[in-house]
């Protein structure tokens, strides 16, 4: 197994982003935290979005290996955290979020030849995605994730807790193929029928139960802001999508329903949530 030399840990983020891009892993710039754990990109991200929210208009879909674009992004946001688009990188990420999941995954088998990242809360194990493996996100909140789509935060990004993402085992020239049990779990999950999406409630209530903090995104009490103070529509819709998708796990709410909600035929849904209540009342 040949290990590829990594950039120095203190190298600029641009150097790391280019290193990933040259490996064939599409990257995208993410929000970064300040020293005291607040949003550092100027868009007023909150909670789990700090250090993880994409900075480009189309999020993960903008990820690229084009060095000109990568240089432009990190020229604009030199401190930006780095995201890797999992699917086109042909990766399978196993991410235990607790010691119980870590023990289970090791018992099932985590083959040698993977790359390992120490994250802000646990570890990510990077494997090559087999050709017959579906692209899917199997998430168990607070326990662990198995992912072949979406994006993953990569070293040397900084977590809002202050911890720095770092490689415990550098990516070898050729990653080992993902363990069969992980592929089987993704395959079984991807085959489960998706419940029919419920219609958006006429009352204006969200289609899933949200915490008071997350509900504020839905009602428009919380919005992401641009540096000039204007509401950042893309970042706010992203945040709404995140809180809905997070609560979707284990509920009958579907991604199709989320798409229907955020792709309304006009701007009334958006305007109702970004216009102050006093103005809406006339």
Image (tube, rainbow, N blue to C red):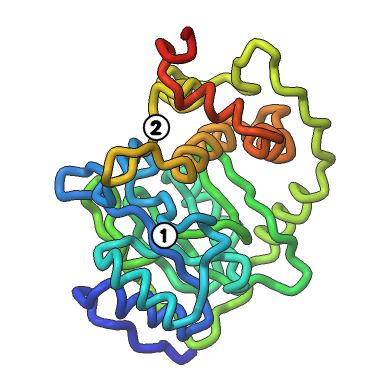
**Which residue is labeled 2 in the image?**
223
Q: Is residue 116 left or right of residue 268?
A: left
Q: Is residue 248 left or right of residue 190?
A: left
Label 2 Cα neighbours within 10 Å, binned few <14 / some 14-19 / many ≥20: many
Nearer to the camera, 247 or 231 = 231
Of label 2 and label 1, which has the lower sequence position? 1
Nearer to the camera, 199 or 157 = 199
Q: Position of residue 194 (x, y in %)?
A: 80, 38
196, above or below 39, in the image:
above
Nearer to the camera, 261 or 85 = 261
Q: Is residue 246 visible?
A: yes
Q: Position of residue 97 (x, y in %)?
A: 45, 46
Q: Is residue 219 left or right of residue 222?
A: right
**Which residue is labeled 1 in the image?**
153
The residue furthest front is 282
Name the residue: 72% across, 33% down: 257
Label 1 Cα neighbours within 10 Å, binned few <14 / some 14-19 / many ≥20: many
The residue furthest bottom is 2
Nearer to the camera, 55 or 100 = 55
Name the residue: 39% across, 51% down: 52
Q: Quadrant of residue 105?
A: bottom right
Name the residue: 40% across, 88% down: 4
Label annotation for residue 249: none
Circles 2, 1 touching at the beta carbon (< 8 Å):
no
């Amino acid at each position: 197994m040949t290990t590829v030399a990594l950039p120095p840990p203190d190298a600029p983020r641009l150097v790391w982003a280019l290193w990933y891009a040259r490996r064939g892993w599409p990257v995208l710039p993410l929000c970064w935290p300040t020293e005291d754990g607040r949003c550092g990109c100027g868009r007023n991200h909150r909670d789990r979005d700090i250090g993880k929210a994409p900075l480009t208009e189309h999020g993960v879909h903008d990820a690229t290996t084009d060095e000109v674009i990568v240089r432009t992004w990190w020229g604009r946001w030199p401190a930006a955290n780095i995201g890797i688009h999992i699917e086109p990188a042909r990766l399978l990420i196993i991410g235990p979020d607790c010691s119980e999941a870590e023990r289970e995954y090791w018992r099932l088998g985590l083959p040698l030849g993977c790359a390992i990242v120490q994250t802000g809360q646990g570890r990510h194990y990077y494997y090559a995605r087999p050709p017959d493996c579906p692209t899917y996100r199997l998430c168990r909140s607070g326990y662990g994730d198995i992912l072949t789509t979406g994006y993953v935060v990569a070293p040397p990004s900084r977590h809002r807790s202050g911890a720095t993402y770092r490689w415990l085992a550098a990516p070898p020239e050729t990653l080992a193929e993902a363990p069969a049990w992980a592929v089987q779990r993704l395959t079984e999950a991807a085959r489960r029928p998706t419940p029919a999406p419920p219609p958006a409630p006429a009352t204006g209530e969200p289609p899933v139960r949200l915490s008071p903090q997350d509900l504020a995104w839905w009602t428009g009490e919380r919005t992401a802001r641009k540096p000039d103070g204007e509401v950042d529509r893309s970042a706010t819709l992203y945040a709404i999508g995140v809180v809905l998708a997070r609560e979707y796990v284990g509920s009958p709410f579907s991604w199709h329903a989320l798409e229907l909600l955020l792709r309304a035929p006009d701007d009334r849904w958006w305007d109702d949530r970004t216009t102050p209540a006093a103005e809406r009342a006339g």
